[in-house]
Amino acid sequence: MNLYGSLLWQFDLLIIPMVIICAIAALTIRDLLSATVVFGAYSFLMCLLWTEMLAVDVAFTEAAVGAGVSTILMVATALHIKRKSKD
Amino acid sequence: MYMESLISFIVTEYNYSAALILIMIGMYGMIAKNNLLKKVIGMSIFQSAIILFYISIGYKGGASIPIIKHGSGMADHAAIDPTLYVNPLPHVLMLTAIVVGVATLGVALAILQKIYRVHGTIEEDEILESLKE
């Protein structure tokens, strides 16, 4: 990936900071259900990044499996345990 | 001279910088967080950062998605220009990595719920306290 070779580097400069912000927020939010939902947003932004890097097969696998199934698994776990985290 | 080329690499090939930052964030989550679910989230961030690194390797500027144009009409062994398509080999490897990662995540969350049923908490220091008793 190159600043000059990319088709849509403006989208890159928008998506990559949002990915990093979502990653930091998913680790720092104390409510575990909110952290799980922010992690789902992180997965979906990663899926957008891969679509834009022309890896369409990886993108729709990530959208179905990463943003779908793993978010459902994490929400189910967060509802079964105590919702508050200490850090 | 070398410093300038290093800085221009970091700025123009910004995907590798982003993958490095995300790997650091995921490793921080796995090491420093006390809550076990936060550790699992850090592991998933680490995994998708490595996938981002591999997909960045396969990217070419000015290329198209790896589907051959007019593929059905090429029975006469016409040569394919590989600069027109991004490299599909890292994509296939990373498809396997995504599926393996979700299986790992499911097992980790199942173990986490089992730990919560036994100890009543998923904070690491409280689990260590209840193991000492």
Image (spheres, coloured by chain):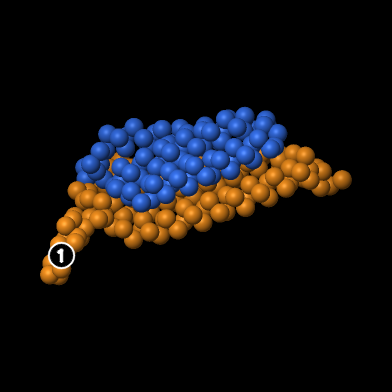
Instruction: From the image, tell me which residue sits under label 1.
Output: B74
Q: Residue at x 38, y 54 (%)?
A: B54
The picture's colour for chain A is blue
Decide if residue A84 is on the left or right side of residue A25: right
Residue B49 in sight: no
User: Which three-letter amino acid code belongs to the residue tagged 1?
Assistant: Met
- Give the quadrant of residue B86: bottom left
Q: Residue at x 26, y 51 (%)?
A: B65
Decide if residue B29 is on the left or right side of residue A1: right
Residue B99 in sight: yes
Q: Which secondary structure lies at badge 1?
A: loop
Q: Is residue A81 above or below residue B83?
A: above
Report x, y in % for residue B53. 39, 51
* Chain letter tied to orange: B
Report x, y in % for residue B93. 40, 59
The count of marks equals 1
